[in-house]
Image (cartoon, rainbow, N blue to C red):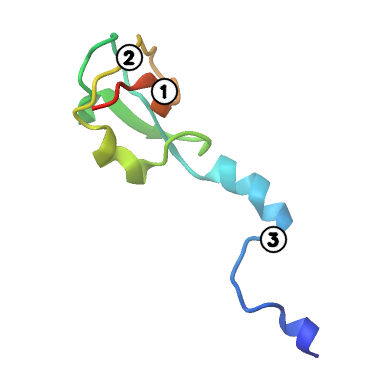
Amino acid sequence: MESALGHGRKEPAAGELEIAAVARKSLVAARFIPAGARLTANAIAVKRPGTGIPPSQLPKLLGRKTSRDIPPDLLLSWDMLKLR
């Protein structure tokens, strides 16, 4: 009976993990962003899939400079940004 109750932690099932990456969203370039530009809210969009930087991290991106050109609709990653 105890094994039927599980371990008490809420976790996604194995089959749900694949869907989670597709169902979640990430931050992407809303337009072309040249190298050295400061990121603004107008330059960033939220789109699927959820394999990039999550939208909850947007405040950490705003105001940072880009380290390279970023084409439109490309998933943003931390290596595209300069350290503060």
Label 2 CA crowd tier, 10 Å (few <14, some 14–19, many 20+): some
Quarter residue 43 falls in: top left
Q: Which of the labelled discs sits on residue 13, or is there none?
A: 3
Q: Residue at x 22, y 14 (%)?
A: 37
* Image quadrant containing the N terminus: bottom right
State whether residue 24 is above or below residue 6: above
Question: Which sits in the foreground, 59 or 29?
Answer: 59
Q: Nearer the viewer, mark 2 or mark 3?
A: 2
| Residue that label 2 marks | 67
N-terminal of the two: label 1 or label 3?
Answer: 3
Question: Tag 1: residue type?
Answer: Asp
Earlier-in-chain disc, 1 versus 2: 2
Residue located at (66% from left, 45% from top)? 18
Q: Is residue 48 above or below residue 1?
A: above
Q: Is mark 2 in CB contact (under 8 Å) with mark 3?
A: no
The crowd level at tag 1 (other Cα within 10 Å; few <14, some 14-19, many 20+) is few
The secondary element bearing badge 2 is classed as loop
Q: Relative to residue 59, is residue 8 depicted above or below?
A: below
User: Residue 33, image x and y in percent?
Assistant: 29, 13
Q: Quadrant of the C terminus?
A: top left
Residue position marked by numbered label 1 in the rendering = 79
